[in-house]
Amino acid sequence: MNQDIERVLISEEEIEAAVARVGQQISADFRGKDPIFVGVLKGCFIFMADLMRHVDIHCSMDFMAVSSYAGTSSTGAVKINKDLGQDIEGRHVIIVEDILDSGVTLSYLKNYLMVRHPASITIATLMDKPARRKADVYADYSCFEVPDAFVVGYGLDYNERYRNLPYIGVLKPEIYTSI
């Protein structure tokens, strides 16, 4: 375990089982609908790669890069750094996100994409942290509900570190309060 991690919250094995379950459920729910998975970079990249290995339907993928965080907290202002490269009109869109926290970014993103007239917008997230919710947005698919702790690993970072951890860990408070 990394020395900056207070404790492992979700093990590699738990992640693998939950991602497989969600991938199978999405496959069942969207069979014959040819959805487009929209990954929200950077945090989603590991989750989305593993999720796609468990989706056995015709689909496509694209990515968006958005920002609303500075350090450990959301700024409240969402910025689109990279937009979609595909037309989503009439398509079933599945937004793939690493964590649904305050909901500010996902609420903005969902409204941003709705003006392009998709058939539907669904949210799939690795983790849901309802204790921090500020916006009225919910995950349609979630692997885990997590407590209000600063989590890293499996794509989630703190100042671009810890994304490569194969598990979800709780970062020691002295790490993110001292930088």
Image (cartoon, rainbow, N blue to C red):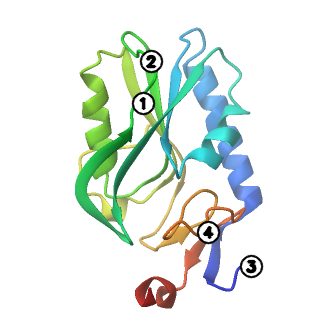
Mark nearer the N terminus (2 vs 4): 2
Whether residues under marks 3 and 2 lie with C-beta atoms below 8 angstroms apart, the answer is no
Mark 3, residue position:
1
Residue drawn at x 46%, y 74% is: 149
Give the numbered dot on residue 92: 2
Decide which of 138, 96 is in the foreground and name it. Answer: 96
Q: Residue at x 71, y 64 (%)?
A: 11
In this view, 42 is above or below 93: below
Quarter of the figure with the C terminus: bottom left
Asked if residue 167 is positioned above or below residue 33 in the image, the reply reads below
Dot placed on the residue nearer the N-terminal end, 4 or 1: 1
The residues bearing labels 2 and 4 have C-alpha atoms spaced at a distance of 32 Å
Q: Amino acid at mark 3?
A: Met
State yes or no: discs 2 and 4 in contact (Cβ < 8 Å).
no
- Residue at position x 41%, y 71% from top? 148
Q: Amino acid at mark 4?
A: Tyr
Which of disc 1 and disc 3 is earlier in sequence? 3
Asked which secondary structure carries label 3, the reply is loop
Location of residue 65 in the rendering, given as x and y in whole percent from the top left corner: 43, 43
Give the label on residue 162, or none.
Answer: 4
Where does the image place residue 61, in percent across and percent down from the top left? Answer: 57, 26
Earlier along the polypeptide chain: callout 3 or callout 2? 3
Depth check, mark 3 against mark 1: the one in front is 3
Q: Residue type at mark 1: give it.
A: Thr
Q: Nearer the viewer, residue 69 or 152?
A: 69
